[in-house]
Image (cartoon, grey):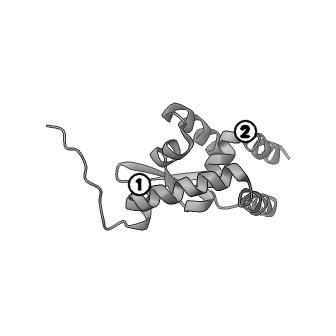
């Protein structure tokens, strides 16, 4: 029961719900894309992602210069049902839909998610420091 309470506490914040929505819709997403879409600072984004990781709702992996976040594999049947319910609710929420439109725009512009996930063979130009 403690683990379930931990998950519900993580879901009790609008910022974390917005982040989860973006991850559900993209499959994987980097911090800079989350910041760009939500308008959150890097500190706020990282803090909320850490909270979601501690609640075992998201996983992360390194891909070159980026850390990509994805939805964690369900740990139990309860966890699986909760994630499915949340995903369904976020598909109709007005704020979540607005964020989804911004995500789509970012992908079309060639954001980090595009380079790291959708087009891994194409790398963005990286500023080289001398």
User: Closest to the observer: 104 or 16?
Assistant: 104
Label drawn at residue 13:
2
Question: Answer yes or no: do the residues labelled 2 and 1 have beta carbons within 8 Å?
Answer: no
Q: In this view, does 76 lie above or below 54?
A: below
Which mark is in front, 2 or 1? 1
Calculate the distance from the C-alpha at mark 2 to the C-alpha at mark 1: 26 Å
Choose top left, top right, bottom left or bottom right for residue 72: bottom right
Q: Is residue 83 above or below residue 9?
A: below
Q: Residues within 10 Å of mark 2 (few under 14, many from 20)?
A: few
User: Closest to the observer: 78 or 120?
Assistant: 120
Whether residue 44 is visible: yes
Of the 4 image quadrants, the one containing the C terminus is top left
Residue occupied by mark 1:
111
Numbered label tally: 2
User: Closest to the observer: 56 or 109?
Assistant: 109
User: Closest to the observer: 61 or 17?
Assistant: 17
């Amino acid at each position: 029961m403690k683990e379930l309470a931990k998950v519900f506490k993580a879901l009790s914040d609008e910022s974390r719900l917005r982040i989860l929505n973006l991850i559900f819709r993209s499959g994987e997403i980097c911090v800079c894309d989350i910041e760009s879409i939500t308008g959150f600072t890097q500190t706020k984004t990282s803090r909320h992602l850490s909270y979601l990781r501690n609640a075992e709702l998201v996983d992360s992996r390194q891909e070159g210069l980026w850390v990509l976040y994805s939805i964690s594999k369900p740990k139990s049947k309860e966890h699986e049902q909760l994630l499915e319910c949340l995903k369904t609710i976020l598909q109709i929420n007005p704020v979540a839909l607005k964020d989804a439109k911004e995500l789509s725009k970012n992908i079309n512009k060639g954001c980090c998610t595009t380079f790291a996930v959708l087009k891994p063979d194409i790398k963005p130009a990286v500023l080289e420091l001398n």
